[in-house]
Image: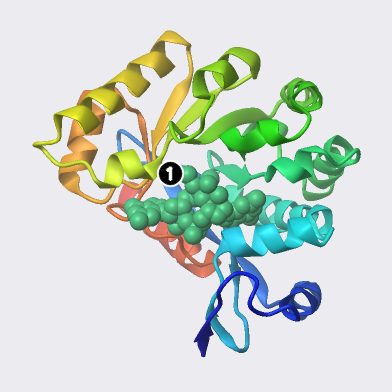
Amino acid sequence: MYLYRMGEDQKLINDLRSAMKAEELYLVYQPILNSNEEMVAIEALLRWKHPRYHFISPEQIIKMAEENDLIFELGKWILQEACHFTKTIQEDYPTMSLHINISPAQLTDGQFISTIKKVLTETKLHPSCLQIEITENLNVFDIEDSIKKLHQLKDLGLSIAVDDFGTGYSSLQYLHQLPVDRLKIDKSFVMNLNPEDGKAKAILSTIISLAGTLNMDVVAEGVETELQYTFLKEKGCHLFQGYYFYKPLQTNQIRQIIENEQIATH
Ligand code: C2E
Ligand code: MG
Ligand code: MG
Ligand code: MG
C-alpha cells in the first residue's frame, strides 16, 4: 500500500470513475453534540477504499473530481447516500440532522437546486434536517450566483453553515452577504488550544460572541480534550465535534451508539 501524493498518478482519475460504481467510495459520519452531550447531527465525510493506495484524503478526491468534471456526479451521490442514511437513522432517532460539505464548484451547477430537491423528495428527508457546509473560498466562483443559490436553499428550508470559519480571507464580508445560520470554528483554533494560550482563547471567545450577536449557532470543530470542551462551553459555544467525543464513524457504529443511548434513556 502506498500513500498517494497529489498529481503523481494520472490514471487515478479513471480509478475514481470506476470507484463510484465499484462501491469503493463510502461515507463516514462524525457526530455533532449539544452541551448536554446529546447527538444532534452527523457530518458526512467522504472516504475511498482504494485497492493500491493506503490513504487518499477527501480533499484530494474532491479536487480530482472538480478538475475532471466528476464533481456534480460525485456530489449527487454523496447527497443521496447521506440523506438516505440519515432518514433510516431517524426511524430510531427522530431528532438527527445531517451536515453535508458542498464544494464551491457544486454551487456552479445549474442543476444544483433541483438535484437537492429531487434527493430530498426521493429519500423523504425533511429539508429542515439538512445543513449545507460551505467554505470561505466560495468567492473564487461567481459570488452573486452563489448567494442566489444559497437563498434558494434557505427558501427550501435548508440551513447554511460556514465551515472552517476564521481561515478565509474575507470571513466577515461573507457573513454580511450570505444567509448563514451556523458558524463552524476551524479546528486549528480549537485543537491547539491550551490553558496558557491567551491569544487563541481570545479568538475563540470573539468568534463565539460574534455568532451570538448575529443570531447564529456556533459549532467548535476539532475538540480533542476535556479542557478544550469546558473552555468552549463556558464561553457559550453550544455545539461540539471532535475526537474527544467521536471520530468519524462507520454507519454500523452510528447505529450502535443510538441503540446504546436508547437503552440508557429507557
Ligand atoms: P471539514 O468539513 O472541516 O471536516 C472536518 C475534518 O476534521 C474531517 O477531516 C474530520 O475527520 C476532522 N476532525 C474532526 N474532529 C477532529 C479532531 O478532533 N481532531 C482532528 N485532528 N481532526 C478532526 P476529513 O474527514 O479528513 O475531511 C477533510 C475535509 O475534506 C473536510 O473538512 C471537508 O472540507 C472535505 N470533505 C470531506 N468529505 C467531503 C465531502 O463529502 N464533500 C466535500 N465537498 N468535501 C468533503
Ligand atoms: Mg465540514
Ligand atoms: Mg472544518
Ligand atoms: Mg473543510
Left or right: residue 67 versus residue 57 is right
Q: Residue 110's image quarter?
A: top right
Could you tell me residue 209's position as x and y percent?
A: 34, 15
Say which residue label 1 marks: 32
Ligand 1 closer than 8 Å to label 1 CB: no
As helix, strand or loop, the secondary structure at mark 1 comes to: strand
Amino acid beneath label 1: Ile
- Furthest toward the top, the residue is 213
- Furthest toward the front, the residue is 8
Confirm whether residue 197 shows in the render. yes
Could you tell me residue 263's position as x and y percent?
A: 36, 56
Residue for point 44% across, 50% down: 31
How would you rate the neighbour count of disc 1 (Cα within 10 Å): few for under 14, some for 14-19, many for 20 or more?
many
Residue for point 51% across, 67% down: 250
74 lies above or below 1: above
45 lies above or below 110: below
Confirm whether residue 131 shows in the render. no
Q: Residue 32's image quarter?
A: top left
Could you tell me residue 214's position as x and y percent?
A: 47, 11
Residue for point 45% across, 36% down: 167
142 lies above or below 10: above
Question: Number of labelled discs?
Answer: 1
Q: Residue 33's image quarter?
A: top left
What scheme was used to colour the molecule? rainbow
Query: 29 or 163: nearer the eye?
Result: 163
